Image (tube, grey):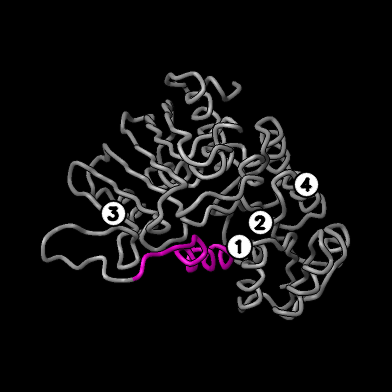
Amino acid sequence: MRLGLIGLGRIGSFHADTLSQLPAVESLVVTDAVPAVTRAVADRVGAHTADSPESLIASGVDAIVIAAATNAHTQLIRAGVEAGIPVFCEKPLSGDLAEAMAIARYVNESGIPVQVGYPRRFDPAFASARAAVESGELGWVHTVRSTTLDPAPAPRAYIETSGGIFRDCSVHDFDTVRWVTGREVVEVYATGSAKGDDFFAEFGDVATAATVLTFDDGATAVVSNSCYNLRGYDVRLELHGTADSVAAGWSDTTPLRNLEPGVAWPAGSPATFFMDRLASAFHAELHAFTQVVARQRKSPCTVDDALAVAFIAEAATLSLQAHRPVQIDEVRPS
């Protein structure tokens, strides 16, 4: 198949490497707002170039992968769907909730498959956790803990336009706990601290957050996030049920120092970057998209999934600001 990749920043460049190595991808066309970047990435991976998203889509690609800036997502999704080709888009659908709802509705009415990028769904341990829930081997799940801790904050300019920690970082945890449990979140309570660089408080954001989610069956999840985990990039999940408990993300690269006497685990070098920690998941995610393009499977992360996560992030943001629990129905139009 012939795929197009739009946006060649940090994650887009990484995706170019992955796509160029997938057996199903016979030809790759790339474009970026900066022509020199387009040429450099194309030369590195042996791809063709296009001078704009429009010319890329018109070149006869079978599908597109969108890794452009968030404010371009809805426009590019719409362009792909209008061309009748499958679309993979990095999260989020949009930085604006109303716009996200509108594009989700448009996609659903079109019948064209769109996959949204939430790579933890493709991490082997996280997938095994979901299978454990589905099989019933955990009994009924009562407690979930999900963690994303970054070793250092993003640059000031990124934080200014990120939409806040819940919309930018916590969404990965929100998607994970919803997907793994198979349950819908009905209530959100969030708190946080801006301690750290001054720009967090300046932009009304927090650098560390804790979010309690209540599911429709009464189970609860605790989501922990921070931008100041110097030891490394920490992504973990725990599920506690009435019959068993399991964890994902525990390995020799887990960035924790164990203080139990005589215990040398984790023994390896801590993971320090999300692309290293989740490299296999990113690869599996794009491989899954080639199967979507080939009509071998349905989208494994739909626009409806992404929209459900956006509602949770919106509720968490409101909860932080209002210092109170927020029902999902308060932010989700009927």
Which of the marked residues, 3 or 2, is nearer the chain's N terminus? 2
User: Disc 1 versus disc 2: distance between alpha carbons?
Assistant: 7 Å
Q: Amino acid at mark 4?
A: Arg
- Of the 4 image quadrants, the one containing the N terminus is bottom right
Boundaries of the magenta span: 269-289
Q: Quadrant of residue 14?
A: bottom right
Q: Secondary structure at mark 3?
A: strand
Residue at the disc numbered 3: 247
User: Disc 3 versus disc 2: distance between alpha carbons?
Assistant: 29 Å
**Residue 20 inside the magenta-drawn segment:** no
Q: Position of residue 135 (x, y in %)?
A: 29, 52
Which of the marked residues, 4 or 2, is nearer the chain's N terminus? 4
Please report contact status of discs 4 and 1: CB closer than 8 Å, yes or no: no
In the image, farthest residue toward the left: 261
Q: Secondary structure at mark 1?
A: helix
The front one of 65 and 52 is 52
Please report contact status of discs 4 and 3: CB closer than 8 Å, yes or no: no
Would you call the spot at circle 2 few (<14 residues within 10 Å), some (14-19), or many (20 or more)? many
Give the label, 4 or 3, closer to the camera.
3
Please report contact status of discs 1 and 2: CB closer than 8 Å, yes or no: yes
User: Disc 4 versus disc 3: distance between alpha carbons?
Assistant: 38 Å
Q: Residue at x 51, y 22 (%)?
A: 321
Residue at the disc numbered 4: 78
Q: Amino acid at mark 3?
A: Ala
Residue 88 badge: 2
Residue at the disc numbered 1: 289
Residue 34 badge: none
User: Disc 4 versus disc 1: distance between alpha carbons?
Assistant: 18 Å
The front one of 262 and 123 is 262
User: Disc 4 versus disc 2: distance between alpha carbons?
Assistant: 12 Å
